Image: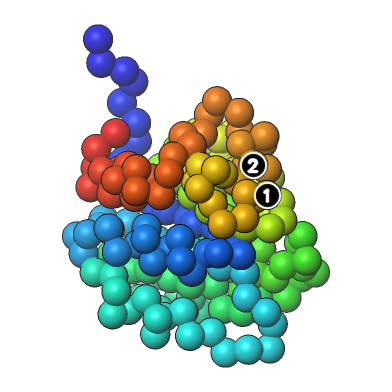
Amino acid sequence: MAGPTLPTLQAVVIGASAGGIEALLRLLPALPATCACPIVTVLHLPEGHTSLLPEVFAPRVALAVKEADEKEVLQPGTLYFAPPGYHLLIESDRTFALSIDAPVHYSRPSIDVLFQSAATVYGGSLAAVLLTGANEDGATGLARVVECGGRVLIQDPDEAQIAVMPKAGIRATGSAARVLPLAALAGTLTRWVEGEA
């Protein structure tokens, strides 16, 4: 018997910290250029430095790649990175907002801030992915995604370069999350953005 039909994804949010570049370089190249939703990523970076993430990832992924701008409308098939020094939020009109509110878990941009705002806007049409990292940023945001009916993927802590962040995400979401090694996680996310459940 078939399970319940899941809503079509309208957005994917991804969070990572220590070891995140290597993990994202294994995850993001799997996503097709025909991806029907935006992919929004927070990777913890030190403030006061120019981010080179769009330049690093653009030649390696099939998606358009850019740093998110204030009031920009999210577009499908585009990979966005949060600019360093700002929280990145998604507003109800599906545009970005940048904030200089206090850091969360010593981090600005904060994964929790992005995940919580995206969950409120997209509800069950959102997928959130939490990868390697050395603090608990993202766990509260994942819980909010689950509460709003969204889907959650977490990198297997045994494989993560730093397991603190995935373990916190698992504690926050329990059985609602799928915990997978990166290769399987990339396959699942690719199927989801292509419209499969």
Picture quarter with the N terminus:
top left
Give x and y (percent) for residue 43.
56, 68
Give x and y (percent) for residue 174.
60, 28
Say how the picture is coloured: rainbow
Name the kind of residue labelled 2 in the image. Lys
Q: Which mark is residue 164?
A: 1
Towards the viewer: 137 or 75: 137
Give x and y (percent) for residue 96.
52, 69
Task: Answer with the quarter of the image where residue 66 lies.
Answer: bottom left
Residue 93 appears in view = no
Relative placement, left or right, of 195 versus 65 is left
Residue 58 appears in view = yes
Q: CA distance from mark 2 to mark 1?
A: 5 Å
Q: Residue at x 51, y 42 (%)?
A: 156
Which class describes the residues within 10 Å of circle 1: few (<14), some (14-19), or many (20+)? some
Q: Residue at x 44, y 39 (%)?
A: 180
132 is higher (above) or lower (below) than 72: above
Picture quarter with the C terminus:
top left
100 is higher (above) or lower (below) than 150: below
157 is higher (above) or lower (below) than 25: above
Towards the viewer: 120 or 179: 179
Q: Which mark is residue 3?
A: none
Q: Say which element carries label 1.
A: helix
**Residue with the mark numbered 2:** 167
Which class describes the residues within 10 Å of circle 2: few (<14), some (14-19), or many (20+)? many
- Do the residues under discs 2 and 1 have CB atoms within 8 angstroms? yes
Q: Residue furthest left?
A: 34
Q: Say which element carries label 2.
A: helix
Q: Residue at x 53, y 29 (%)?
A: 176
Towards the viewer: 68 or 46: 46
Relative placement, left or right, of 56 versus 191 is right
Name the kind of residue labelled 1 in the image. Val
